[in-house]
Each structure stands twice: as structure tokens, then as C-alpha cells.
Image (tube, helix red, strand yellow):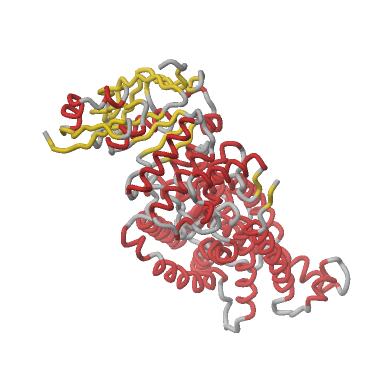
Amino acid sequence: MSTPAFLVARDLGVILSGRDVLHGVSLQLARGHLVALVGPNGAGKTTLLRALAGLVESRGEVRVGGDALAALPLRERAKRFGYLPQGHLVHWPLPVRDVVALGRFPHGATDPARLSPRDDEAVARAMQITDVVQFAERSVTELSGGERSRVALARVLAVEAPVVLADEPTASLDPRYQLDVMQTLRRAADAGALVIVVTHDLGLAARFADTVLVMAGGKLAAQGTPHQALSDDILRQVFRVSAYRADYQDSGVILPWAGV
Amino acid sequence: MTVRSNPASRAGAVTAALLVGVGLLMIGSLGVGPVKLSPLTVMDALIGRGGDVPQIIVQQIRLPRAILALAIGAILGLSGAALQGLLRNPLASPSLFGAPQSAAFGAVLIIALGWADVRSYALPVAGITMAFVSVFVLLSVAGRSASLLLLILAGLAISSLAGAATALVMNLSSNPFASLEIAFWLLGSLEDRSFRHVALALPFIVVGAALLLSQRAAFRALSLGEETAQSLGVDVARLRLIVIVGVALGVGGAVSVSGTIGFIGLVAPHLVRPLIGHDPARLLIPSALAGSALLLAADIAVRIIPSTTDIKVGVLTSIIGVPFFLYLIVRQRRALGGGVA
């Protein structure tokens, strides 16, 4: 990578209820990149994401923007990471705009009814990018799954953090929404963010990512360009599949085809 | 600053209306009793005009009772709204979690052991300690998932245990008025309270309320779940602790002068939600005012309803509160059936 690394992890490890779910993970990732984090179920993808954001206790070191994560106050961490968990849970029937406005919480905007012009702008922009403006005053609980996941994405984009961590943002979406979400994240990366996306869809990873991280058994099994990291060998060893490959519109197509 | 007219200003209007309502109920509470006083007489007596008798009745006898109803109703409503916000669960409330029952046990134990009389600060301290223990145990038992069923079952267990322990202590004590006392602590009452009782409870209620209100923004972030709230910069573990301490201080302080008054904390937030929406931060103050209004109204009602002996105000709030609770359970049936909120 030519640009300097913004997010650095050294020998990162996590133990959850006595089980070693993540160990020896070292990374150097730069802004302006979309990174796909793939791996079989239980490989530790979500745990890695949480460890990078400081949401789970970990060994090793994480540095973000030159600072040690452990030394950053919560509020400062929150400004640097936009974190989109799985499930897009909202516990109360709040208006969409209020949910998106919570993305400004780390910036001190704790009341969605009283946003500064700067916060208001960020919220409006995030809602525009994700195409949820027409739901602004509706309750999130009235929306379909696809609509709700766009609202969740809008909330994360509203943080305007240099690092976006998205845990399976395309799960349970129809093909069009999957493409829309990936396109949106791709654009966030092009605009200068470091975007890390957990996904099970190797096709989407190959299509949109600059870098692919492959995890297996709590370790990094491979990292590199989609072409390097999703080689036939890796697919066979890590995912136990073979894949159909092709080139279409200047990008590599990978379609898992059969178990091996 | 862009100020949206909708929810914030509606909350403001509702708050104003509730303030007026609470003010009227205060005047009502000062006027109702064996000697009926008109609102005008009450106002006169409050500012030291009119006859000596109305002045003594209003200022010495009824004002402490009304102030306690106001403050205790407020802290119960606020605690309910705060617990519901913390657990993202509309069925959370201090009384369903056994906090008042446990506080009553603490107070009763102190009295029975002869460590302090009923007007000592040892009472609220004991009540607060037990309330803290009960909420802490409950949240530990239910765990981070805060599943509806677990919380309610654990709360039921704790409140039953605390109620039984209170009755047991009273039974074993040599107090000739034991059964009367049991009724007071388990059922709750504001009768014959003096300014000494106000001084006993109010400081704790005020500090508890201040703690809960200081966390209002965090409740809003918590709408998105604990992990997301953490990622937005909320220290969730610290928030939990502050809420437990705030509820324990407020409820423990209240119970040590009023006994167990249930269901205000459950009902109050539900009364204001249809008016101002579900934003857990915006609900806090209106819920407190609704709690005040409910308890003032109930305390007026027990003096108006004709009966041979005194009706305890806690009985009345439970008689209204339990059917309401059942109604909420029916509405939440799907979530309860799944076991997860």
C-alpha cells in the first residue's frame, strides 16, 4: 500500500469466555480503501471488527490515526469509528431522522431536535446518500427490513468517521439493495474513509473491495487484492469450495460453485 | 440551531400541561380531608392569610403529605422511565423489580432490631442499601440480554422474597402493632406525615433524580442497543451503575417514609408515550410529572372514597396498576412468547 496506514493492529487477540476466538492478527490498513473481511462462520470476523473498534477487551495493540486506541477516551474513539453491527436493532419506535441523528452523538449532538447546522448537514447528507429522506418522519419500526438497513447505514455514515466498520450490511437484502449498500460504502471509501465490510458474499467482495482479508479459526489466513486473497487454494482450504471465475466489465467475478 | 417543531415542542407542551395539572392536584390535596377547604382558602392559608385553623391544617398537616406525594410520585415515575430506557423495555419498573419491597424490608429490619426509631436517617440509608442490592441482583441475574421474561421472573422472585421477609421480621418482633406496621410497609401510605419525614426522604430523592436526569442523553443512544451505544461513546457499564444508584437512592428514600407504593413507575411513562413519542430521554421529566399527578390523585382519592377505615394509597395504586400491567403483558405477548424483547 502506498498511502500510510491509518488503522494498525499488532498481534491482536481476544478471549471470550475462556475461548481463544482471535489471535495473532496484525494489520495495516490505509484510508481510501474498501476492505472486505471474509471467512467461514465462527472464523472471528465480528470479533476482529469489535476489537478494532475497542468494543471488546483484547490483547495486542490497535493504533488509529497514529494514536493508541487504548489511550483514547470513549468519545474520541466514537468519532473515529462508525460501527454498524449486525441486526440493525432499534428498540423504540423512533422517527428515522432521530435514529440517523444519533450518528452525531459522538460529536456532542445528543438531542436530535437541536442539531447544529453542521450536524444537521451531516444527517441530511447521510440520509440522501442512503435514499431514506422520504421516510424521515416515519417510525423505523414501520419500515421493511431493507429500508431499515439503509437507515442503519445512514446512521453510521452520519458519524463521518475516518473508519467505517460494517458487519454484514448486505445480509438479508435483495440483490439490488446489496449492490446499493456496497456502492454506497465504495463511495465512502473513494471519499477518503477506510471501510471494512464483513461479508459472506465472495462475489461482492471480489467486485467492490481493494483488499480482502480472509479469516479462519481466529487467524488471518490471507490478505491481499481480491485476486490474491481469493485464490483457488484459499477457497479450497478455508471455505472448502471451488469457484467459477470470469471477467466481466473489467472486474473479476467469483461465484462459489461446489463443495470440495 | 435548527429546532424542529414536532417532538421537542410537543414534549414542552405536555410538560407545561402536566405542571398545571400537578399544581391543581397539589391544591386539591391541601383542601381534601376531614375538614374540607376551598381552593381559595387553601391559597390564603398557604401564604399565611385567613384563620389560624386553616393555616395549621394546610401548612402543618397537609402540606408535608402533599409534598411527599409530589416528590415520591415524581421519583417513582422517573425511575420507571429510566429503567425502561436502560433496559429498552416498556415493562421495566421499580416495583416489578422488587426495589420498593426490598427497601421496605431494609427499613423494617432496622426498626425491628431496635437500631433506630422511625424518624432516623438510618431508615432511608437501610432502604437505599436494600433497594440497591435488589436492583443490582436483578440486573445481574437477568444478564446483559435483559430479556423480558427473565427480568419479570427475577423481579417477581425478589419482590416476593422481600415482602415475605418484611412480614417475617414484623411477626417475630415484639411490637404490639406489628400487623398494622406490616400493612403500612407493604401497602404504603402518606397519612400523618410531617416535615420531619419530608426532610428524611427529600434529599435522597433529589440526588437520585439528579443522577437519573444526568444520564438522559445516554438513554437515547441506548435505543440502538448496548454495543452501538458503546460505539457512540457511551460508557454502558458506568451508565448501568449510575442508574442503579439513582433508582436505589430515590426509591429507597421514598419508601423509608411512605412504605411500598407500587406501579406508579410502570404506569407513568406509558401515560406520556402516546403524547410525546418513545424517545427515552424526552420521556424522563414528563414521566416524573405524570408520576406526581398519579400519586397526588391517588392520595386524594383515598381521602374521598367513603370507607369505614383508611384505604392505603399503595393499595389503590396497585389496584389500578396491576390490571394495567396485565394489559401491557397482553400487548407484549409476542415478545414474551419469544422470551426476548
B37 vs B154, left or right, is: right
* Percent of width and height locating residue B198: 68, 57
Where B173 falls versus A68 (above or below)?
Answer: below
The residue that appears at 52% across and 62% down in the rendered structure is B260
Count of labels in the image: 0
Residue A151: in sight, yes or no?
Answer: yes
Q: In which quarter of the image is the N terminus of chain A?
A: top left
The quarter holding residue A245 reads: top left
A223 vs A7, left or right, is: left
* Percent of width and height locating residue A211: 35, 25
- Residue lying furthest front in this view? A249
- Residue lying furthest left in this view? A260
Where B140 falls versus A192 (above or below)?
Answer: below
Where B130 falls versus A229 (above or below)?
Answer: below
* Percent of width and height locating residue A56: 40, 32
Where B125 falls versus B231 (above or below)?
Answer: below
Residue B176: in sight, yes or no?
Answer: no
B43 vs B316, left or right, is: right
Q: In which quarter of the image is the C terminus of chain A?
A: top left
The quarter holding residue A15 reads: top left
Residue sitting nearer the eye, B111 or B12: B12
The quarter holding residue A83 reads: top left
* Percent of width and height locating residue A26: 35, 19
